[in-house]
Amino acid sequence: MVKVRMAAPVLQQNDEVAGENRELFNKKNVFVLNLMSSPGSGKTSILEKTIGKLSKLLKLGVIEGDIYTTRDAERIEKFGVPVVQINTDGACHLDARMVKPTLEDFDLDELDLLIVENVGNLVCPAEFDLGEDARAAVLSITEGNDKPVKYPLVFRQSKVVLLNKIDLLPYTDCEIELLEEDLKKINPELELFQVSARLDEGFAPWIAWLEEQVGLKKGS
Amino acid sequence: MHEMSLMLGIVDLLRKNAAENNIGKISKVMLVVGDMTMAVPDALQFAFDSFRDEELFGDAVLEIQKKPVSGECKDCHQNFGIDDFNFLCPFCSSPHVRVASGRELYIDYYEGD
Ligand SMILES: Nc1nc2c(ncn2[C@@H]2O[C@H](COP(=O)(O)OP(=O)(O)O)[C@@H](O)[C@H]2O)c(=O)[nH]1
Ligand SMILES: [Mg+2]
Ligand SMILES: [Zn+2]
């Protein structure tokens, strides 16, 4: 019997392709954001509001990850921004290899910002680097106060958390200060924005953050 | 649920490596999984049992070694264990803490003939 040492990272193949994607994004100076949350937290709704505010200021593209449907892509298409749908055909997350071929469908020389809406899932997408510059997580206040401690990885790896559905605060038991405290323990450097996509409220700091990131990438 | 796609990758890596090393039968696989990955050991076991083929894997066992989460403070340079994903430095309260262990996800070794 022989013992073979491998020390082989399981995600190595994904990480290599993610590196290639990242290199391309850097060459083209496109800021890429990987947007993650549970199903129904409001990723697409936030995207719709964000596009409405940003599409006059900069050139935006969207990749929509979904297990089977094209519904979210149809919602985004109405805003006249380039959108490409990836159907994962059952997989609970996007990976770098799924993203790579879609990049040919965008004119990256023209784009300033590419937002990837990941498959609705708080667990699996966190494990897969797509080549993005930053990750943002959406957490709606109706999901329960325990979600950060139950699914810490996605929040640890995000630069931004959007606390959505703030309009529902009076109807829930959500204690927003405690929620923010838990998030800050997991990731003390996190930027937190309270928004309501329904009422179109609280978006200014988030939009400013995006503009700043795009500016930094352009300048680099 | 992504344990399925992780395990597909693992079995693939093992097949390639076994072929390169002229190993026809694998008896044991040692996987290292940090507590800060989202991979659940039971689900990995289940996935392993679904994807292994008789020829190469026969009665092979998958063993999983867990690694606890620990951090290193970028300000005071202390090392410490991290419970409940509280990433504030317990020595100086700094928020600048590097994850020192807990993100591992790799095949350490396998045994076979
Ligand atoms: N009350 C309220 N509902 C919202 C808000 N944002 C999204 N929703 C609703 O939540 C549901 C899921 O939203 P969607 O954007 O599709 O979530 P996704 O699955 O994360 O993309 C829809 O019915 C939205 O209308 C919000 O700020 N307040
Ligand atoms: Mg959606
Ligand atoms: Zn310290």
Image (spheres, rainbow, N blue to C red):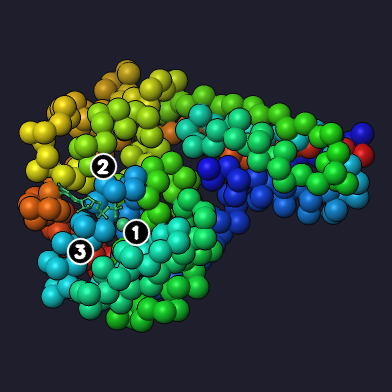
Q: Earlier in the sequence, mark 2 or mark 3?
A: 3
Question: What chain letter is assigned to the residue under label 3?
Answer: A
Label 3 CB less than 8 angstroms from ligand 1: yes
The x, y position of residue A104, in whole percent, is 45, 79
Crowdedness of circle 2 by 10 Å Cα count: few (<14), some, many (20+)?
Answer: many
The x, y position of residue A50, in whole percent, is 18, 62
Tell me the kind of residue under disc 1: Glu
Q: Disc 2 designates what residue?
A: A139
- Name the residue at the top extreme: B91
Tell me the kind of residue under disc 2: Leu
Label 1 CB less than 8 angstroms from ligand 2: yes
Q: Disc 3 designates what residue?
A: A48
Element at badge 3?
helix
Q: Residue at x 72, y 38 (%)?
A: B49
Q: Quadrant of residue A71?
A: bottom left
B31, A170: nearer the viewer: A170
State the mark number for residue A117.
1
